[in-house]
Structures are given as structure tokens and as C-alpha cells.
Image (cartoon, rainbow, N blue to C red):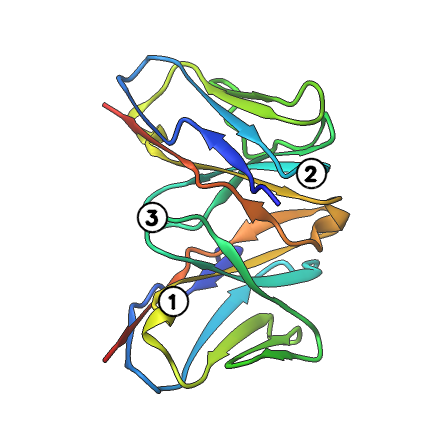
Amino acid sequence: EAGVAQSPRYKIIEKRQSVAFWCNPISGHATLYWYQQILGQGPKLLIQFQNNGVVDDSQLPKDRFSAERLKGVDSTLKIQPAKLEDSAVYLCASSATGLAGRETQYFGPGTRLLVL
Amino acid sequence: RKEVEQDPGPFNVPEGATVAFNCTYSNSASQSFFWYRQDCRKEPKLLMSVYSSGNEDGRFTAQLNRASQYISLLIRDSKLSDSATYLCVLSGGSYIPTFGRGTSLIVHP
């Protein structure tokens, strides 16, 4: 079974530039998560989708971050404009149904972002 | 108080040792508890779920104490390959998945 795919794996940009990340979850998984993991910290949930609807985006900095999952399959996360403090690993995860948080989440390899 | 707290370590132990980590949480509405393992520069992977009655998977034992609001992970007979960061995760109901910062374990020969 193919895992969660993410691209690009690495990205270096200058502050105030825009960047976009892509995620393709495990086939058939209804729930998709985007996390931000800053060095030395645990992953922090940015947004959770159930199919193509948003379940929670309370921790997403909406002035600069946006995410979509238009067809309920793959998803993109965008940062515009980027700040130095956005340097982190952006992890995408998926789970089969998202049953009230009781399921295993499967993570992709992440995108390492460095903002200069 | 942070929602989920873990001692970052590192815990430096010899092969064969027994080591235990705790994870305390503040939200009593948390319903589901997990331990994930994260190797250096890799993604987190599920190690085990934590059930109310406690559960064991080979050398690993997880326990939940709702009264004191913590979960624990016990690793017996540590192997070099156990060296990693161990993340606790809480979720459930309307409570979004929340990770601790992780506890670093180094097992040396």
C-alpha cells in the first residue's frame, strides 16, 4: 500500500516570498491533517479536513496560511508571504475516517522549509 | 500549564536497561491517547495506542492514569534501535490531536 506522498521534500525561499506544499494521502483515507513541526518541538496541527470539508483550522495563521482539499483527495498548503519563523517541517498525515481522533495517523515524509 | 508536557530528556541508557517516560496532560476531555516514535529527520510513526486498562506490545508497555492525567511508556530490555524521540498524542471528541514535544532516548552499547 502506498503511503502519504508529499512534495517538494525541501524548499528554500526568502522572507516575503510565497510557497506551496502538496500532499496526496493514502488512497481511501477521508481525513487529512497538516502539521507544522519546528525543530525541537512536537507537530502542531494547522488544519484538519474530513473529505473536502474543514474540521478544524483554529491553529492556522489565516493571515498568511491557506489550505484546500477541493476534491477530497490531495491537498495543498500555501504560505503567502513567508516569515522567518515559518522555517519548519510541514507534515501531512491521513487517517481512514478520523473517528473522533481515535485512529492511527499515517504521516508523509514532510517538506523541510527554510525561510532566509 | 501546557496542554501536553513531556520531559525532553535526553534519556541516555545502556543496552538492556529499562526506561520509562511520562506524559502529563491538562485537558480532562481527552479521549484517545497514543505513543508515536520519530527517528531523526523522519516522520512520526505509531508505536502504540494507550488503553484505559493498560496494554503491552512485546517490550513496550503503555499505561493511562486518568485521575492524575498522565500516560506512561515503559521500554524493557532496551535495544540500540530504540534510540529515537517518543511523542505522546492526545485527541478525541472535539479536542484536536495535540502532540507533546517528545522525549529523546539514546541507547548506547
Q: What residue type is labelled 2?
A: Thr
Q: Are marks 1 and 3 in contact (CB under 8 Å)?
A: no
Q: In which quarter of the image is the N terminus of chain A?
A: top right
The CA distance from mark 1 to mark 3 is 20 Å
Vertical side of A77 occupied by B3: above or below: below
Q: Point out the residue furthest to the front here.
A: A1
User: What residue sits 30% from the left and 83% below the top?
Assistant: B15
Q: Which numbered dot is residue B41?
A: 3
Residue at mark 3: chain: B
User: What residue sits 50% from the left and 81% below the top?
Assistant: B59
Discs 2 and 3 carry the same chain letter: no
Residue at mark 1: chain: B
Vertical side of A39 occupied by A32: above or below: above
Q: Which amino acid does label 1 sit on?
A: Asp
Residue B55, visible in the rendered structure:
yes
Percent of width and height locating residue A39: 32, 45
User: What residue sits 56% from the left and 71% below the top?
Assistant: B70
Could you tell me which secondary element the residue under label 1 belongs to?
A: loop
Residue A96: quadrant of the picture: top right
The total number of labels drawn is 3
Q: What residue type is labelled 3?
A: Arg
The CA distance from mark 1 to mark 2 is 30 Å
Residue A110: quadrant of the picture: top left
Percent of width and height locating residue A64: 46, 18
Q: Is residue B41 left or right of residue A95?
A: left
Discs 1 and 2 carry the same chain letter: no
